[in-house]
Image (cartoon, rainbow, N blue to C red):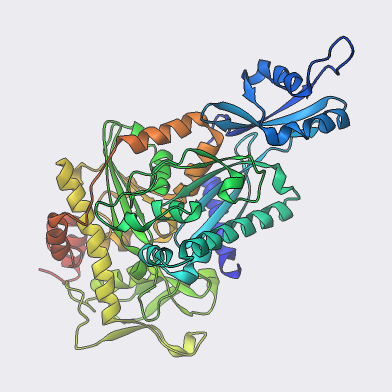
Amino acid sequence: MSGFTNQKAAILQLQERTLTKVEPDPMSKKFYLELIPPSMLNNQADVDRLRDGLTSFVGQVTVPLALMSTLPGICRDGDWRLTVTLGRTAGGWLVIGVEPGNTTARHFGLAVDVGTTTVVVYLVDLRNGDILNVKADYNGQVAMGEDILTRISVARKQDGALELRKAVLETINRLISDLTTENEISKAEISACAFGANSTMVHLLLGLESNRICKPPYIPVVNNPGLLAAGEVGLEIMPLAPVYFLPGVGSYVGGDVIGGVLVSGMYKNPEIALFVDIGTNGEMILGNKDWLAACAGAAGPALEGGVVLSGMRAEPGAVEWVRLDPDTGQVQYRTVGGAKPRGICGSGLVDCLAEFLLAGIIDLAGKLKDGKDHYVVVPATETEHGMDIKVMQEDINNLLRTKGAVNAALEVLLDAVGYGAEDIKRFYAAGAFGQYLDLESAITIGLYPDLPRDSMVRLGNSSGEGARQVLMSDQLRQEAEKIATNITYFELIANDMFVQKFSSSRFLPHTNMDYYPTIKARLRERGIIT
């Protein structure tokens, strides 16, 4: 996990800035009971006595058979002073744990963001919603495929789905183990868990068939799995703990996006807002309190460095920030963690493309001038491995295709609802890429729309924060389900207009410069255009 040292710090700082206080109504609750011991004058059965003791708190509860056999011993060991943990179910409350004594001060849950590339697990104090600790690591499935389509293909093979499920569960359970060890708590003390994840990750984690997600008419097995038990999911926490997955909308708009919409608050405001999460996939939600529309498509391999010669993930040594002096050609750069350069990650690549354009190194079609086929960002004398870190013409072409797909998706979405970019009053950038990407660079190349900069908000890991919010609040869980139900999903794969828009958007920042007035003015200032 050495590559996640800086990411962990960044996530913690981000959560300190954006953590929304939620009125605690968590997915599990703890109650301390002092029951009247049985006697010859009071011979009520142990389970019935417990149920009656809980009535004043939550009304009727269900006691599962698995706990009935252990209850008599626990009651007597605690001299009838007990802490009962209840888990939320679709029909009410289930007794999921009973302990002797008063343990209400130790009440823990998990919020988990399962990304295609990374997994982040937050340890949450269910008494108040505070994040006590966080752990992150690469999704173990990466070894079997970098992207969703490859993993769906792997899942079709014999035992493929089983291996993929095992890989991601091992990642999650290892992070849980690290969290419990560091914080000196037992895994059995974790009594609830909420997930934010895209549709494919949910299917692979639950062992559901994922094959139809990528085939017309693109139908997943389930969009809202509801409340499940940790034991059946495979999580190494309290076996009966309720587990909730933020609901999805379709094959490519999953619970991670719904979590982002929830966190942004765009679903309850009158102004039209755009939510964008660009990672291994790119998802967009446009709308306000009256309507929401969504689309999604592949976006991330180029932006994550996956198909770039000198590309790498945002680990120590990755060039993450680049500036270029247009007069001298001198390159300034910054690496993740300040380490010696080893490669270049997505935010650095976007910076390069923007700086190349502004310096006149590439033309509006993204072609390197003077017959060059590459540009050296960091010379071999400054790198860890003694080789140049360079951006190739083919790398630029790949970036343009990715940028064009995102650009075209937004245009299709706007056309579908009858609005223009000028109608967008608030822009939300989600995910790790959105957190560290330079907004000005993203606008310069046309990846983000040319909007007033003060209207643009970085949400960070809104998938994880959305999971924390539904973990802590049943009202917010219900709101997330309403959001998912109210979204109109536009499938891009079958959209002829998307192909047309894609062709016209593979220029910097766009074929129609009027869409990017501030960039047009800057290019004119520098003599790039007339």
Q: Is residue 53 above or below residue 344?
A: above
The answer, for residue 501, to whether it is visible in the render is yes
What quarter of the picture does the C terminus occupy? Answer: bottom left
Q: Position of residue 336 (x, y in %)?
A: 50, 69
Q: Is residue 382 above or below residue 360?
A: below
- In the image, 234: left or right of 448? right
Is residue 500 or residue 366 the one in the foreground?
500
- In the image, 503: left or right of 442? left
Residue 438 image-quadrant placement:
bottom left
Question: Which residue is pictured at 82% across the width and 32% down the height?
Answer: 74
Q: Position of residue 403 (x, y in %)?
A: 26, 64
Q: Position of residue 338 (x, y in %)?
A: 54, 72
The answer, for residue 18, to whether it is visible in the render is no
- In the image, 493: left or right of 338? left
Is residue 91 or residue 502 the one in the foreground?
91
Question: Which residue is pictured at 48% across the width and 28% down the height?
Answer: 475
Instruction: State the residue lying farthest toward the left.
Output: 530
- In the image, 504: left or right of 187? left
Q: Is residue 119 above or below residue 65?
A: below
Instruction: State the residue lying farthest toward the right.
Output: 40
Is residue 350 or residue 356 the one in the foreground?
350
Q: Position of residue 343 (x, y in %)?
A: 44, 78
